[in-house]
Amino acid sequence: MEGLFFNAQNGYIEGVVRGYRNALLTSQNYGNLTQCETIDDVKLQLGPAYGDFLASLPPNPSTSALANKTTEKLVAEFRYLQSNATGTLSKFMDYLTYGYMIDNVALLITGTLHERDTRELLERCHPLGWFETMPVLCVATNIEELYNSVLIETPLAPYFKGSLSHQDLDELNIEIIRNTLYKNYLEDFHWWVNNTPGIQGSPTADVMNEVLEFEADRRSINITLNSFGTELSKQDRRKLYPNFGRLHPEGTLMLSRAEDVEGVRIAVDGITEYKNFFDQTGMGQSGGGVGNMSGGAGGESKSLEDMFYQKEMEISKLAFTRQFTHAVVYAWIKLREQEIRNITWISECIAQNQKERIGNYISVF
């Protein structure tokens, strides 16, 4: 049925995305990068793939400046695709931006709470989460004004209504706010994938159901782990879990009752992949911890977050084995973001004269 909605224009966009995917850095490219001695060397090696975007960088740029320029390439390509998308693909790409919007709004809320100049905060917002009325948020002088602006002026309004009030927007609750918005967003996206004519039952739905169920489970697990030692009650924790996913409902019920890492490990035991993640990271065992979120390097063991990223890359690579699916746009974004993380990690190791730390952290696809 999706073929009726997958018109020639969207077919052209899928072809462009597959071209973008083929242009990602290869194992040989990464091998060359690991031999670099300076950031200028890195910049030179990235020339064929990122040349136009790196041209304005000064000699020996900072790693953050390099990361910003590589992100600019991703954003420019996404905006090109978005400007040419029609029908269900156009709406699908809108959904892909909402997660970035949530992060941006959370940043602006935090800035307003600390009475910072929100105009400066705009520069720190992710470009994929930019929306036309975002500058309107900058005129807010207090949390209530900001809340009302979000409800009226942004695409996130449906995720606030009925879930949050301006009294909720304080520093103590900022992560609860972020997770509530993500829960509402993921549930909405999941509903759209499974109920939109031309999408439900299609290759797009097949891939995106796997994507969204994995993301729902990942967030439920991370919310639980991050809640230990905080004031977040078990009841409030449970409200933050998306109401779908492979862990839902039995696994998430067990997560809501977990009191330690071992309890989380038991809750996910029924899903072989997640069980293996915990086994490989040593979490839930004697002396096992949550691990760092940035990942291990060289001989260091990988963290749970590394395992989640690895799974995300596997799903994204497999998406390209399907034809006539909007999901390749999602997959390409995730692969490109991992490429940017790889470049940033390599650059930071070189800048700190710690090339031996590059190790096996980078993911090649």
Image: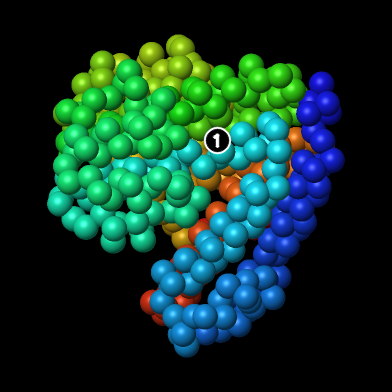
> Where 202 falls versus 131 (above or below)?
above
Residue at point 70% right, 33% down?
87
Where's the C terminus, which quadrant? bottom right
Q: Nearer the viewer, residue 102 or 208?
A: 102
**Secondary structure under the numbered disc 1 in the rendered image:** helix
Q: Residues within 10 Å of mark 1 (few under 14, many from 20)?
A: some
Q: Position of residue 140 (x, y in %)?
A: 22, 45
Which color scheme does this rendered protein use?
Answer: rainbow
**Could you tell me which residue is drawn at 70 percent across and 43 percent down?**
85
From the viewer's perspective, tell me whether residue 147 is left or right of residue 262: left
Quadrant (top left, top right, bottom left, bottom right) of the N terminus: top right
Which image quarter: residue 225?
top left
Q: Is residue 139 left or right of residue 13?
A: left
Task: State the residue in front, 103 or 262.
Answer: 103
Regarding residue 72, the answer to whether it shows in the image is yes
**Image quadrant assignment for residue 252:** top left
Residue drawn at x 26%, y 20% as measured from the top left = 236
In this rendering, the answer to whether 54 lies above or below 195 is below
Of 70 and 121, nearer the camera is 121
The picture places residue 287, in percent across and down from the top left corner, at 30, 40
Q: Quadrant of residue 120?
A: bottom left
**In the image, 343: left or right of 160?**
right
Mark 1 — residue? 95
Q: Is residue 267 above or below residue 134?
A: above
- Residue 137 in percent (x, y) is at 30, 45
